[in-house]
Each structure stands twice: as structure tokens, then as C-alpha cells.
Image (cartoon, rainbow, N blue to C red):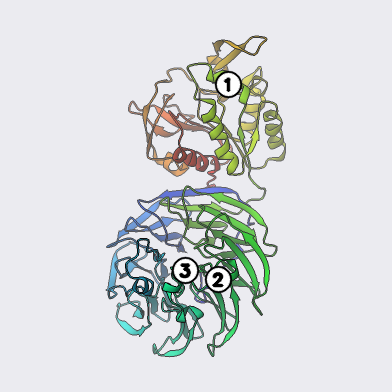
């Protein structure tokens, strides 16, 4: 379920090494994925704003089934006893068979309660509530407990859908209930935390946060609502609020133990749900742009890590690492003890989905409509490089065959911003030789589509470049075939001619370029293999190859030629020479290339 357990501590098993090992898979849906993933029975359950609820295979991301709901799904699922439960934007609570995706029953919440923020401010040109996440259910003793936008907390019989009890709060309930020792803990948009007896639905206690008494009209924005979901650990309830405070409340009596005040950080919202492990509380802030660790005993800050953008999601702890997403579109791995960044992974849009970690893989969704599975089971960090040679780029720019130098520089900068080392003609050979020696997982992406002759070698089938591929290396290439063209320059470094070496190009990769189709703007349609590698459904490309046994086609043109393909050299899946014929680069295609570059499926 959301936050992995009934207490919502956000702690997952000691899974994997925490070392980034590449992209296991990426699954595209038809809308933003704000729901957080739930993993059960070898499947990833997750909803999308396209109105579909997906069951994806954990190993491949392949779709087992999808269920069409009545509207967008922004709640996270809970799975138990062959059933999976989730809510839609229209207030429908679904129970679906987890094996088949067939609906078992559904229940309807009443219409959403009015927002106090909008009531207090009345007509307002820019009304922003941030109300796009929904409550996620908790399941215990054949009872599913979930909050509704109507201000009610519901307890359903999981088999029949019968309402066992309803508990009314004073505002929308988007917070996800936590359960500990037979008590349900949940926050409401009325600014209060409620403790409810699971068996009877009767109130045990209520704690009014500072926001309960604040008025939005005094600030111009919401300072009342509680979107954060409580975490319960060692008899204490931890929860954040839009009133710029994080609360630690005694779970038995509802009395305040301590509070962390964020007003000094610009009255930032704390919508993130805390994670708690080893007497340390971890949480993130919205406008504060940071995550931090607090001592559970008294709320003293142990460390703070600055984030590039707002943090709406909730951290997950697995092993020594804390995993957290943010509005810059990044997944960060941060050392839980020191607060230092271990690595980060960049997506194509902002992220509100919270990560889940199972069997050495981090799963999360993005506002680019994708579900990501990122491997954290590496034995060595992945070495990544982008090749760029300005002198060669300028020579190409003087011909009719290449893109502008500025475009290649943008290509270089995109990958450099993702953490790729920039290597040039003088340093490429050394980089490849080190990878042959250390056997680290690696990839080099070529922004400049010319292979230095000394790297290709006088006998290309045995040169340094080929030895790198034979040793398990990976190359992503988007231009003319490597070693096809030899640039002839004079003593003033002026391009005087081009010579064509079909044999060198073929020997380098042990593929035949004969019959290749070089036309601008060919239509490329992705294959199932190309979709696994992360490519878009279609694009306009160039340099399409006839099919041959040694090539795995990733995209096919209208004639059945491969506009994208991979040549594996007997090493692990996701390695080898990857060719993608592109007629042009944009941010969307560069993002896809990055997924291709870092795609590392596990061996079957």
C-alpha cells in the first residue's frame, strides 16, 4: 500500500546496493502519473490521469491488464487477498480483481466539500489549492479505510463493499490513513488530525494544528489544509501541514510532543508525508525546496539537503538510501545518515509520485505520463560520457551533411546536465580503455558523429572502439555510420574533401551497410523491442538499414527497413551499439535517447 505499511513509515526492505545501475524499464501512459506505485505479486499497480489503472510486470514493465475508471486516478492503490483498491477524481472507490483487472465492486463518495481557501477569498483571479492528490486506502482485518473529498473517512468491507462506518471531518480528506494498534490516524483539510477507532469508527482524539485557526484571507494562500499522511512510529504520530509546521503527537493521548516550525523558511507547505526509521524523521517541503532529517526525540535538525525544486512527494527509505522525487523531475538518492547526494536521475517533467522500492528497483510515476523502474542494485557506479569534438563539429558544419554546431553543443549540454562526462578526440580513447580494464557498466553517447581514426583503428574489427563493444560497452549513435566518412583537411585545418569507406564502416561493427537507405525524414514506427528500450512511438529519421540476423530492430520505416537498431556483441542485455537515425533533435527526443542510453534490463 501507499508508504509500504500500515504505519506509513515509508520504510522498505534493505533492497539492493543503492548504486544506480540504469533504467530497468519505462512505461508510457496517456496522462500524468501522480499516483504512487504499489508492488504486489510481481506486479506494479498504478493509476494515471488518462483514467486507466495499470497492472505492469515488475520485471519488464509489460502491461498485464488495465482497468478503465470514470476519471483520472491520483490515489495510490492498496492490494490484499487478490483485490486492489483505489479512488478516482470523481469520487469513485473501486475494488478490482488483481489477477484479471475485472471490477468486483465500487462505491461512490458524496461531492467534494468546499475549500475553505476559496470560500474565504471568494472570487480570485489565481486560485491555487494544489488539490490534485487523493487519499489512498489502508487495509486491515478485511476492512479498507480511505478518505473522501466529501470530508468523510470510510471503512469498507473488502469483500462486499458494504460501508462498516463513516466518520465526518470538517474538510476534504486527501491524507492517507495510517493504522497502528487498532487506531486510524488521518489528517483533514480542516487543519485537524484525527485518531479513530478502527473497529467502531468512533473518535479517540482530535488534535487541532495551528492551521485550524488560521484564515487564508490573511495570507492569500491556504495555510489550513493537511495533505500530508501521518506516519506512526514508537507511539508517536508525525505529520506535516500547510500551516508550515511538522507535528509530533503522542499516538495514545493526542498531546503534542514537539513541533518543527518552517515559517522561517518562507512559510513553506509541508505536504510531504514523513518517513521514520531508527528514531529519525525524514520529510520534504514545497516552497522551501529541501528535504531534511530530524531527531525523532525532539525535532532537532540533523541535516538538510537542498533540492532544485518543490518537494510534493514523500521519501522512501531502503537500506542506507533515502529516495525522493521533486518538481524538477528528478529522483534523488541521498545517504540517509549524512544527507549527501549519492546520485540522481532526471525525467522529462515534474514529479509528484512518491517512490516505492522493491528487490533493488525504485518505481515511481512522472508528469510526463511515464512509469519508471530504476535499478539500484549496481556493484559499480555506471560510467557515462558524451563525445563532443568542437573542431570536427565545425568541419562538419561547413558541409551539407551535418546539423549546426550549436545543435550538437545543445546535445552535449543536455547529457552533461544529466551527469555525463564530456570526452573529446584527445580523451575518448583513454576513457574507452579504462572501461575495458575496470569492466564498469558504461555508455558513451556521440554528439559529434565522427569516430576518431586512432580510436577506430587501422583494422576496425580489432581497434579500441570495437574492443570496448566486445568487452560489454555501450554506444549510442545518431549520425552517419561511424568511419563511413573520412574528413580530408589541409594544413590550415580547412576541409577539402570527403572520402567514403564502406568497408571500414562495415568491419567496425560486423554489419553490412549495403542497401542502407539514406533519405531525410523517413517515418519510423517503434517496434515492441524499441518500446522496451524507451523510444517514442514514431519519429522522422534517416539512414535506415535492411534487416539482418545480427540486428535487433527498434523501429521500422514504411519499407520495413530498421530506422533504429541495436547490435549486441554477446554481453549483457542493454549493451552494444545502438543506432537511432534522427532527422532532428528536440528535448523530447533527447530525453528518449537518455533512457535508451541508460536502459539496463536484468537478464531473463
Q: Quadrant of residue 274?
A: bottom right
What SS does tag 2 mark? loop
> Residue 595: x, y in percent?
50, 43
Which residue lies under the disc numbered 1?
394
Indicate which label's residue lies in the foreground, 3 or 1.
1
Disc number for residue 274: 2
Which residue lies under the disc numbered 3?
2
Marks 3 and 1 close (CB-CB < 8 Å): no
Indicate which label's residue lies in the foreground, 2 or 1.
1
Q: Earlier in the sequence, mark 3 or mark 1?
A: 3
Q: Quadrant of residue 64?
A: bottom left
Using the image as rendered, state which of residue 473 and residue 128 is in the foreground: 128
Q: Is residue 109 above or below residue 529?
A: below
What SS does tag 3 mark? loop
Marks 3 and 2 close (CB-CB < 8 Å): no
**Is residue 600 at all visible to an observer of this figure?**
yes
Amino acid at each position: 500500500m501507499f508508504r509500504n505499511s500500515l504505519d506509513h513509515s515509508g520504510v522498505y526492505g534493505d533492497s539492493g546496493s543503492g548504486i544506480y545501475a540504469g533504467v530497468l524499464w519505462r512505461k508510457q501512459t496517456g496522462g500524468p502519473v501522480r499516483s504512487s506505485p504499489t508492488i504486489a505479486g510481481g506486479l506494479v499497480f498504478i493509476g494515471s490521469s488518462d483514467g486507466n489503472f495499470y497492472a505492469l510486470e515488475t520485471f519488464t514493465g509489460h502491461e498485464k491488464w488495465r482497468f478503465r475508471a470514470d476519471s483520472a486516478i491520483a490515489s495510490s492503490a492498496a492490494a490484499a487477498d487478490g483485490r486492489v483498491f483505489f479512488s478516482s477524481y470523481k469520487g469513485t472507490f473501486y475494488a478490482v480483481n488483481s489477477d484479471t483487472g475485472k471490477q468486483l465492486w465500487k462505491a461512490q463518495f458524496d461531492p467534494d466539500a468546499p475549500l475553505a481557501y476559496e470560500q474565504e477569498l471568494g472570487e480570485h483571479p489565481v486560485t491555487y489549492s494544489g488539490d490534485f492528490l487523493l487519499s489512498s486506502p489502508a487495509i486491515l482485518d478485511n476492512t479498507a479505510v480511505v478518505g473522501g473529498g466529501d470530508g468523510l473517512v470510510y471503512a469498507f468491507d473488502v469483500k462486499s463493499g458494504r460501508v462498516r462506518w463513516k466518520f465526518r471531518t470538517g474538510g476534504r480528506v486527501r491524507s492517507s490513513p495510517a493504522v497502528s494498534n487498532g487506531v486510524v490516524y488521518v489528517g483533514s483539510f480542516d487543519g485537524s488530525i484525527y485518531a479513530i477507532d478502527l473497529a467502531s469508527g468512533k473518535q479517540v482524539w482530535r488534535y487541532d494544528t495551528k492551521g485550524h485557526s488560521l484564515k487564508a484571507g490573511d495570507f492569500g494562500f491556504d495555510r489550513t489544509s493537511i495533505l500530508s499522511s501521518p506516519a506512526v512510529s514508537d507511539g508517536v504520530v508525525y505529520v506535516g501541514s500547510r500551516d508550515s509546521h511538522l507535528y509530533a503527537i503522542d499516538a495514545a493521548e493526542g498531546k503534542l510532543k514537539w513541533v518543527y516550525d518552517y515559517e522561517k523558511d518562507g512559510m513553506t507547505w509541508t505536504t510531504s508525508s514523513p518517513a521514520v526509521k531508527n528514531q529519525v524523521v525524514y520529510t520534504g517541503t514545497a516552497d522551501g525546496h529541501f528535504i531534511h532529517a530530524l531527531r525523532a526525540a525532539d525535532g532537532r535538525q540533523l541535516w538538510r539537503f537542498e533540492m532544485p525544486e518543490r518537494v510534493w512527494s514523500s521519501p522512501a527509505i531502503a537500506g542506507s538510501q533515502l529516495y525522493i522525487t521533486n518538481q524538477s523531475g528528478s529522483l534523488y538518492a541521498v545517504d540517509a545518515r549524512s544527507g549527501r547526494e549519492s546520485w540522481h536521475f532526471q525525467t522529462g517533467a515534474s514529479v509528484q509520485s512518491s517512490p516505492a522500492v522493491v528487490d533493488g528497483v525504485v518505481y515511481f510515476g512522472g508528469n510526463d505520463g511515464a512509469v519508471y523502474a530504476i535499478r539500484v542494485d549496481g556493484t559499480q557506479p555506471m560510467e557515462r560520457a558524451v563525445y563532443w569534438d568542437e573542431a570536427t563539429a565545425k568541419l562538419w558544419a561547413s558541409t551539407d551533411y551535418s546539423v549546426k554546431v550549436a545543435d550538437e553543443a545543445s546535445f552535449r549540454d543536455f547529457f552533461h546536465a544529466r551527469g555525463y562526462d564530456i570526452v573529446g578526440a584527445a580523451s575518448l580513447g583513454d576513457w574507452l580503455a579504462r572501461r575495458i580494464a575496470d569492466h564498469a557498466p558504461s555508455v558513451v553517447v556521440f554528439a559529434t558523429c565522427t569516430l576518431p581514426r586512432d580510436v577506430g583503428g587501422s583494422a576496425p574489427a580489432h581497434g579500441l572502439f570495437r574492443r570496448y563493444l566486445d568487452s560489454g560497452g555501450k554506444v549510442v549513435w545518431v549520425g552517419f555510420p561511424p568511419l563511413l566518412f573520412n574528413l580530408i583537411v589541409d594544413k590550415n585545418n580547412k576541409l577539402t574533401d570527403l572520402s567514403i569507406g564502406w568497408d571500414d564502416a562495415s568491419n567496425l561493427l560486423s554489419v553490412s551497410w549495403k542497401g542502407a537507405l539514406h533519405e531525410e525524414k523517413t517515418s519510423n514506427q517503434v517496434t515492441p523491442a524499441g518500446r522496451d528500450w524507451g523510444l517514442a512511438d514514431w519519429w522522422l529519421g534517416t539512414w535506415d538499414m535492411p534487416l539482418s540476423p545480427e540486428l535487433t530492430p527498434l523501429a521500422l520505416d514504411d519499407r520495413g527497413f530498421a530506422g533504429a537498431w541495436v547490435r549486441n556483441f554477446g554481453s549483457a542485455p542493454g549493451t552494444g551499439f545502438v543506432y537511432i537515425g534522427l532527422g532532428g533533435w528536440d528535448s523530447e527526443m533527447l530525453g528518449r535517447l537518455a533512457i535508451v542510453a541508460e536502459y539496463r534490463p536484468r537478464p531473463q
